[in-house]
Image (cartoon, rainbow, N blue to C red):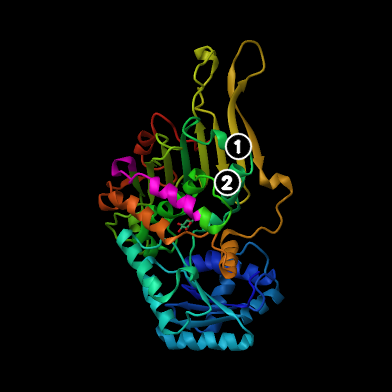
């Protein structure tokens, strides 16, 4: 755990993310003893008092918490909660933080967690400055960080007027997922894979994150972001960097960021002609959505990393809401063997190329699929696979959820799994052609795999999903 007790200022404390992940996560960290003495001050636009906020928190634990909440653990947690409405401004917040610090009666540290939409981040940062809550503080900024290059550059500049870079933790929760970190272990702790991890052996890569979820109550956020800003420029590109980066000189924040940033620097600008944008039918009549909204709820694209390792290897990314299945996979398709001695009707190649697939589901899964001989006379080939599931290993104990892990890292000042200003600005830069001339959104049926042209995009290959 962190060295000092923490006072957490949770801005956006009644929002979707806070209720789904942050409050249950903080509860778990507190009740499991990771953050002794922690105090949490909720802040949001809602006009609540501390008791009202406790009810919100309790509701969130009951609805979204993964664990049973004992009366004792709840009482301790409830006692650590306080609340100030945003309308109280800097003075009310300052007073609440002072109260919390006094009640701790010892040296402590602050963690400001900004779970707010991109356009609300700056006013909150200014308020923290005005309230004098900068010293002994770290600040966690939720994604998307800005909405384009200009806004990200300006947000970084304004942020640096108040907080030093070492205090800023730009969070991307996909990097806190166990399986994402397992990509690094898999690539760099073994001798088998890294020699083939390049354009000589790999034909293309797919990062595919379809979701069955819809909009929920997030119209206000989602209408400003859409699938590209919500998922691709953040999570999917971060995962892509883990897949594509060179071995870092050490498993430490700076060398890792440096290698990731080199990947981003080598990315070619996104060509709008290589992008399919979609919107599920019915989206425009969701509560809070503009009836003529052009926001995409689906996006698929092809991108390139133009360096020695990856030149000519397309990376296909796809994600969207209200699709047929919820999955998070990375699939690597290997190149065909240089020559085939199998007769054309043997089945060789008939089920696509051989693949290595990572499943970013909570417990890592991996599979390697390859052609093998079907038992019997003659030479008939079938696609077979080797499967690994972390769940079967008995190694899974009380795993920290992605947000929990990252909150704890931020409290300890460990930046290894956070993103950098430079990396994010570069990602907005490669996104500029797409953001400036996005292709029109195409409607798709709820429960489908997205609009039809998603298949043309990947041709002559095929999407690995559905399996
Ligand atoms: C969030 C996005 O960052 O990630 C959501 O805002 C998305 O739209 C979510 O549903 C997916 O995260 P996970 O951990 O459920 O895969």
Which residue is pictured at 54% across the width and 88% down the height?
98
Disc on res. 183:
2
Query: What is the tally of numbered marks visible in this picture?
Result: 2
Q: Is residue 452 above or below residue 155?
A: above
Q: List the single residue furthest toward the left.
A: 437
Q: Position of residue 131 (x, y in %)?
A: 44, 84
Q: List the single residue furthest toward the front.
A: 249
Disc on res. 367:
1
What element does badge 1 sit on? Answer: strand
Q: Position of residue 237 (x, y in %)?
A: 44, 50
Question: Which quadrant does the N terminus fall into?
Answer: bottom right
The reply to whether the C-beta atoms of the residues labelled 2 and 1 are less than 8 Å apart is: no
What element does badge 2 sit on? Answer: helix
Left or right: 357 in relation to 11 = right
Q: Is residue 322 visible?
A: no
Q: Position of residue 39 (x, y in %)?
A: 59, 79
The part of the chain drawn in magenta is 257-275
Q: Nearer the viewer, mark 2 or mark 1?
A: 2
């Amino acid at each position: 755990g962190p060295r000092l007790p923490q006072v957490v200022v949770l801005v956006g404390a009644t929002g979707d993310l806070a209720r789904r992940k942050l409050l249950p996560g903080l509860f778990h960290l507190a009740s499991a003893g990771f953050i002794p003495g922690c105090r949490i001050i909720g802040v949001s636009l809602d006009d609540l008092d501390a008791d009202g906020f406790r009810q919100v928190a309790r509701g969130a634990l009951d609805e979204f918490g993964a664990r049973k909440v004992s009366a004792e653990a709840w009482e301790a947690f409830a006692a650590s909660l306080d609340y100030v409405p945003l309308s109280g401004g800097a003075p009310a917040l300052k007073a609440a933080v002072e109260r919390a610090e006094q009640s701790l009666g010892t040296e402590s540290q602050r963690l400001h967690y900004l779970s707010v939409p991109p356009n609300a981040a700056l006013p909150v940062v200014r308020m923290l400055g005005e309230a004098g809550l900068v010293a002994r503080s770290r600040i966690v900024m939720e994604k998307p960080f800005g909405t384009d290059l200009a806004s990200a550059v300006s947000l970084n500049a304004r942020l640096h007027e108040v907080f030093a870079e070492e205090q800023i933790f730009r969070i991307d929760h996909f990097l806190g997922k166990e399986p994402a970190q397992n990509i690094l272990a898999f690539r760099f702790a073994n001798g088998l894979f890294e020699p083939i991890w390049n354009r000589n052996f790999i034909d293309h890569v797919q990062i595919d994150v379809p979701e069955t979820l819809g909009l929920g109550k997030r119209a206000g956020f989602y209408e400003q972001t859409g699938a590209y800003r919500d998922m691709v420029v953040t999570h999917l590109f971060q995962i892509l960097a883990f897949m594509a980066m060179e071995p870092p000189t050490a498993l430490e924040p700076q060398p890792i960021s440096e290698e990731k940033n080199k990947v981003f620097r080598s990315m070619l600008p996104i060509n709008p002609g290589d992008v399919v944008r979609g919107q599920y039918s019915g989206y425009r009549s969701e509560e809070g959505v503009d009836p003529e909204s052009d926001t995409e709820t689906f996006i698929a694209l092809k991108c390139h990393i133009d360096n020695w390792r990856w030149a000519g290897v397309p990376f296909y990314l796809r994600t969207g809401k209200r699709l047929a299945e919820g999955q998070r996979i990375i699939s690597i398709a290997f190149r065909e063997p240089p020559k085939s001695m199998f007769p054309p009707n043997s089945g060789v190649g008939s089920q696509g190329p051989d693949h290595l697939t990572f499943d970013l589901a909570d417990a890592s899964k991996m599979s390697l699929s390859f052609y093998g001989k079907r038992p019997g006379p003659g030479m008939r080939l079938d696609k077979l696979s080797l499967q690994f599931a972390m769940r079967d290993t008995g190694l899974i104990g009380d795993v920290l959820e992605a947000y929990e892990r990252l909150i704890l890292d931020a409290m300890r000042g460990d930046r290894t799994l956070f993103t950098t200003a430079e990396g994010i600005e570069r990602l907005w830069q490669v996104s500029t052609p797409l953001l400036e001339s996005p292709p029109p959104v195409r409607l798709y049926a709820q429960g489908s795999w997205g609009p039809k042209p998603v298949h043309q995009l990947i041709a002559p290959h095929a999407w690995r999903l559905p399996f």
